[in-house]
Amino acid sequence: MTEPVSAAEIDGVVPPAEPKQSGWRVLLDALKPSTVWKMADGQPVVLKQFVQFCLILVYPGWVVGILACLAVYGLFYITVYPVLWLLFWPVRAWMKKNRPEDYAESQRDKS
């Protein structure tokens, strides 16, 4: 199936892209009950009520799972990320010295 086309795309005006949220922000937003509650949106009325009821029952497990994801995510940045940063330091230093334009472009891509 094709995606619906908005009036702005037909006129040739491209809407501004929304900034990408960080992984931390996505996980913290997933902890909000309103986010879980909205998962049932778009369903027929009776089915929506049933899905919301099931989501209420599952919510405590959802919170535990999200907190576990946050812990794993945090441990990655405390343990694995610094090790990789140190291992690839010579590559970054070589790029910065020998190909400054490419290095600057790669740094711009991160933001």
Image: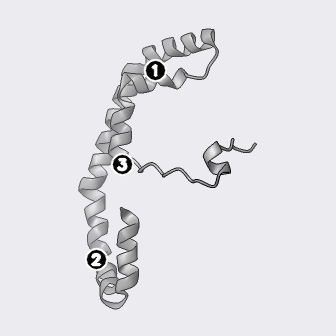
Q: Is residue 41 left or right of residue 86?
A: right
Relative depth, front residue between 106 and 18: 18
Relative depth, front residue between 12 and 23: 12
Secondary structure beneath disc 3?
loop
Q: Is residue 53 left or right of residue 79?
A: right
* Residue hosting label 2: 89
The residue carrying pointer 1 sits among few (fewer than 14), some (14 to 19) or many (20 or more) residues within 10 Å by Cα, namely some
Which dot marks residue 22? Answer: 3
Which kind of residue does numbered mark 3 sit on? Ser
Residue 49 lies, in percent from the top left, at 55, 10
Residue 33 occupies which quadrant of the picture?
Answer: top left
* Residue hosting label 1: 37
Residue found 40% across the figure and 81% down from its top: 102
Relative depth, front residue between 100 and 27: 100
Q: Is residue 105 above or below residue 100?
A: above
Secondary structure beneath disc 1?
helix
Relative depth, front residue between 91 and 106: 106
The mark that comes first in sequence, 1 or 3, is: 3
